Amino acid sequence: MSTTKNLYGRRLPGYAIATAVVLTAAIGLAFFFAPIEADQGFSQKIFYIHVPLAIVTLGGFIFGGIFGIKYLRSGESRDDLRSYTAIHQGVIFCIGALITGCIWAKASWGQWWVWDEPTLVSFLIIFLLYTTYQPLRFSIEDPERQARYAAVFAVVAGVFVPVNFIAVRLAAPLIHPRVFSNSGDSLPGDMRIAFYTALIGTALLFITICKYEMSSKHSRAQLAALRRSIGGESDEPNAARRAAPRVAVR
Amino acid sequence: MSTARPPSTLSAARTVLYKELTLERRAPQTLTAMALFCASAFVIFHFALARNEVEGALAAGVLWVTLTLAALLGIGRSFVADREEGGLDGFLLAPAPRISLLFAKAAALLIFLLIIGFFAALLFSVMLLGPTPDGAQWASLALLILLADLGIALVGTLVAGIAIQTRARDLITSILALPLLIPLLIAVTKASEPLLSVGGGTLAWRWLALLGLYDLIFGLLAYALFDYLIED
Amino acid sequence: MTNTEPAVVCSGLVRSYGERRALDGIDLTLEQGQTLVVFGPNGAGKTTLLRVLSTLLRPSAGDASVLGSDLRKEGWKVRSQIGFLGHQSLCFGDLTARENLRYHAKLHGIENAAARVEAVLEQAGLSGRGDERVFGYSRGMLQRLAICRAVLHQPQVLLLDEPRSNLDPAAIEQVEPLIGAASGRTRVVASHDPAGGLAEADLVLGLRNGAAVLLERAAQATTEQIRELYR
């Protein structure tokens, strides 16, 4: 039987350590090394948290869509689990991106929410869409159908993301100059180092959490299977409806 | 011995479409509900906005929000008869190409949306719209209604196909369809704004392009994914 | 043109829902023109077996074929050759019987659809009420209409889930040439009637919790064995 470590937990300790190291470095760089921005002051530092969160969120959703396609073609529950985890964590990171975006908006313009920032608005719309993922899964009882429909959703939503960005950007007034619009391009060298470190750290954090979640689910499923084979059929409350995918124990 | 040969996609789609339209004609629930909804919505907007007339961006918003929410009614009904009376099984048992169901359902929804779209636009121009659009603007508006309804029909059929198999059909339909329709709404309201303004304006090509892109992308998505929704 | 291949072949057929196996490894071979009667308590898998053979459900594992066509790979071919009768009539209440049947005829690509529809309506005794909307039908009439729908395209194999439910004795006699042994077709029938089912069977399958606990030639099976299934 494949162990959790082989299937999902490969190099998990390594990722965890790398995450801790890089994130610590990023925080250090952001707060002590990078210069304070002229216009916005210290509060601009939230940029080093907000933008990496946003970028990693998008990455998560796109991977969710890719694994969705893989699942539709292969039918392997492993791909469904990957798709689910990527989207699930993506939603959480998206909340983080939205909250930090609000904090930045409050610090910069004195308001908790601004409609003039197309990226922030796009993220809100994407968030509204992806939060339907869990209710959708939960409302389908048959596990195979649940996985299949969730995969269809993941693909549709994944394609939706760029279309949405284009639409919102076209609709935005071109008045407000934004630091974020050219994140990475017009940044001076010191800021760039801090930014990319933060980005890599956030990406590592995402991967680590996903691996952890998948490993944890798989271990729990293996334990349940063992308990079932020892104790008999009645042990596992399989009848309970779940949004999370059933992990195949192989 | 069987004297049958599997029907072509077009033939099967036509058969299902005819069935859909006949069912609606016999028991016109969907169209009636959508029409009544639009009329009530305009009344509500009059009171809620405290205006006798709207124009420009506000007019575009009122019109398209009303049409979108009315569309949700139509989308919700799309697969219901099949689910309740086993019609989906009846289709699946036949050697007809599966994709013809998508074409038929989307076409039926499009027809309903077009009827309601033009009805609502006329009603709106009487009840709430301030400026009077000229011939060219009406023509542009008609084109917008056509393109927007095509997008709504495609997305709606896809969402309905997903939602019908869930235990919370109405809820899932709404929460799934609305975010997906936002880019379409952005394009169509921005495009409608000059058509409904005092002093008039013309259609901007960028919004038509966006609408066209949206329709194309979701059309392709629906075409590629529909089989996975239908087959068990 | 007839060929001599078996009508239905199942090999290790499995259908699961999550961890639950609705069908747990079914093996059987049914020759053309013969009748397989499936017994078993509710939830044993009778309906699931019929739905899998009709291509409404896909097998989770194992193989099955109807008249030589594999269920997974040549589903569309299978659909032309089977007639399925389930618990639902699969007809729309707001359409008339004729409209419903013409709809199904077109979906099956039947030539001379109108004539064929008239013929089955006549045989089932529904001609007189063919232009009434179906929601006004009694359950017996609905069942007869469903039978019409199932045999409309003259399928070689009939998959019948408790076909005689809701039918009075006169109606049963009326539809016998369409779906009974006299029709000459290969039939797979799910039944709750041990004596009656056994009488019309060539092959008997007993299911419990998805597994085949009884598979016998009808001549060797007894009603007692069948009643055992329900205990």
Image (tube, grey):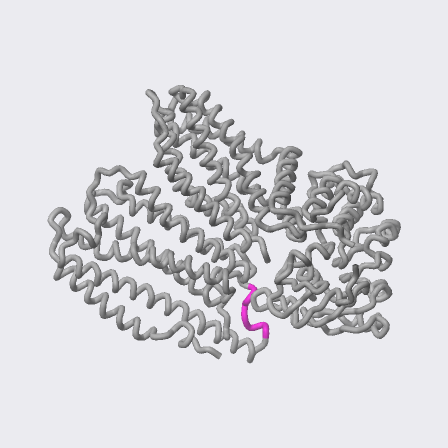
Image quarter in which the N terminus of chain B is found: bottom right
* Left or right relative to B59: residue B79: right
State the residue in front, A137 or C157.
Answer: C157
Task: Establish if C71 lies above or below C93.
Answer: below
The number of numbered discs placed on residues in the rendered structure image is: 0
Residue drawn where x is 48% and y is 64% of the image: A245
In this view, B45 is above or below A226: above
Q: In this view, does C52 lie to the left or right of B56?
A: right
* Outermost front residue: C1
Q: Is residue A29 magenta?
A: no
Q: Residue at x 59, y 58 (%)?
A: B232
| Residue A88 showing in the rendered view | no
Quadrant for residue A56, please give it.
bottom left
The answer to whether residue B38 is left or right of residue A113 is right
Q: Can residue A175 be seen in this view?
A: yes
At x 54% / y 68%, what residue is drawn?
A237
In depth, the one of C46 and C50 nearer the eye is C50
- Measuring from the top left, give residue C156's x and y in whole percent: 77, 58
**Nearest to the observer: residue B141 or residue A180:** B141
Pinpoint residue A140: horizontal percent, then vertical percent: 53, 56
User: Looking at this view, is B191 or A91 the one in front?
Assistant: B191
Q: Position of residue B54 (x, y in %)?
A: 38, 24
**Residue C8 at what x, y percent from top left?**
73, 65
Q: In this view, does B101 lie above or below A22?
A: above
Q: Which residue is drawn at 72% across and 39% down?
A: C99
Which residues fall within the magenta stretch?
A233-239
